[in-house]
Image (cartoon, rainbow, N blue to C red):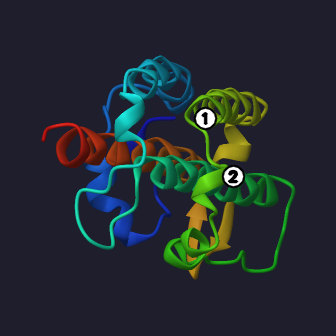
Amino acid sequence: MLVSELEFYPPYYEEAYKKLPSNFPLLQLLSDRIKFIEFYREIPDSQWTYSYAEGKWSIKKLVRHILDAELIFCYRALSAVRGEQKPLMGWDPDAYAETIDESRLLKDRLIKSLELQMKMTLDLFTSFSDEDLKKIANANGFDTEVAAMGFSIIAHEMHHRAVISDKYLSN
């Protein structure tokens, strides 16, 4: 499925979806993004605790946030495919981040977790049929296709990788 084929997704993802390659199917994009692990490996150790402005997260916390979001999107996708009829929870990324103990976040462990999560996400979405990808669940108050959840995972990580490049590594 291509991002241009999506019909049901939260409107706030419209701009993010426009930044995705329109001619690559979801599973290819999920597979291709594993190469970006190298981007995280190349971030100097000294930058992982850096925050570019007061109140902004460190790279460590940002990567943990990427992992948290991906886990939540995967749960939503699995729930939709398995036929969950109840609305799926929303979440407050800032409230989640407040509970993170940064002293427990280690660069190597975060990178390994991100790599494993990317592989698990690919495995999960590979197990879905074309019909599964079109299934809809109400997630965070919006009817959302399973494929849209996959594209959201890609767009979310891509957005934060760009923020890291622009705000954390360009100084």
Q: Nearer the viewer, mark 2 or mark 1?
A: 1
Kindly identify which numbered label has been placed on residue 36: none
Residue 54 is at least partly visible in this image: yes
Q: In x, y percent, where is residue 54?
A: 26, 71
Q: Is 160 located above or below residue 165 in the figure? A: below
Residue depicted at x 43% and y 50%: 156
Q: Is residue 159 above or below residue 21?
A: below
Q: Residue at x 22, y 37 (%)?
A: 169
Q: Which quadrant holds residue 171?
A: top left
Above or below 91: residue 125:
above
Left or right of residue 73: residue 29:
left
Residue 165 picture location, percent across and down = 24, 38
Q: Amino acid at mark 1?
A: Leu
**Residue 38 horizontal side relative to residue 171, left or right:** right
The answer to which of 11 and 111 lies nearer the viewer is 111
Amino acid found under the numbered disc labelled 2 = Leu
Q: Which residue is mark 1?
A: 114
Residue 37 place in picture, x, y as percent: 49, 23
On the picture, is 124 further left or further right than 157?
A: right
N-terminal label among 2 and 1: 2
Q: Circle 2 sits on which residue?
A: 71
Q: Is label 1 in a helix, a strand or a loop?
A: helix
